[in-house]
Amino acid sequence: MIQVTVYRLKNQINAFELSGHAGSGPYGFDLVCAGVSAVSFGAVNAVMELCELELGIEQGLEGGYLYVTIPDELDSSIMNKVQLLFEGMLISLKTIEQDYGDFIQIKEEVE
């Protein structure tokens, strides 16, 4: 199962973590894993390019792990764009969770 944890500080996403494997199909044909990967990596790439921002990124060597942190002390206009893009990612992941809840679980932690 893919575990998604979104970390919030002052009601804003400041980090998120994805770990595990969906196991909804054989390797290379796992549609849940492919969907989650496309949504999360697409959002990370969009933030980096559209906001001209370097994120803190940790990845597992064999896949199945992604931890992303947003830098502290961003200009408010940049932070608003980052939040919008990552909130969009979260909505997409929740849509996947609604249909494939046996393979993905999302939780939020407020600091």
Image (cartoon, grey):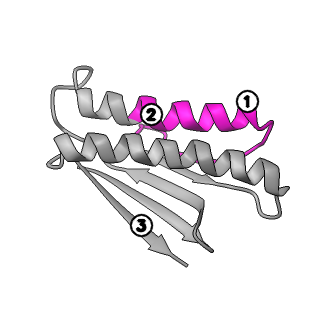
Rendered image quadrant of residue 99: top left
Q: Looking at the picture, which amino acid does disc 1 mark?
A: Glu
Task: Name which of mark 2 and mark 1 comes first in the sequence.
Answer: 2
What residue is shown with label 2?
39
Residue at (21%, 46%) from the top-left corner?
Answer: 98
Residue 82 screen position, x and y as percent: 67, 47
Tell me what residue is drawn at x 42 percent, y 38 percent.
63
The residue that appears at 42% across and 37% down in the rendered structure is 62
In the drawing, what numbered circle is on residue 108? 3
Q: Is 54 within the magenta?
A: yes
Name the amino acid type tagged 2. Answer: Val
Element marked by disc 1: helix
SS at badge 2 = helix
Q: CA distance from mark 2 to mark 3?
A: 18 Å
Q: Upstream in the sequence, badge 1 or badge 3?
A: 1
Please rate how many residues cluster around mark 3, counting C-alpha atoms within 10 Å: few if below 14, some from 14 to 19, many from 20: few
Q: Is residue 21 visible?
A: no
Residue 30, compared with residue 85, is above or below; it is above
Q: What residue is shown at x 63% (from left), y 51% (from top)?
A: 83
Q: Is residue 38 left or right of residue 52?
A: left
Question: What span is colored magenta in the figure?
Answer: 37-64
Q: Which of the 4 image quadrants contains residue 38?
A: top left
**Left or right: where 59 falls relative to 94:** right
The Cα atoms of the two marked residues, 1 and 3, are separated by: 26 Å
**Mark 2 or 3, nearer chain start:** 2
The stretch drawn in magenta includes residue 66: no
Residue 28, horizontal then vertical, whole percent: 27, 20
Q: Residues within 10 Å of mark 1 (few under 14, many from 20)?
A: few
Name the residue tied to disc 1.
49
**Quick one: which residue is furthest to the bottom in this view?**
111
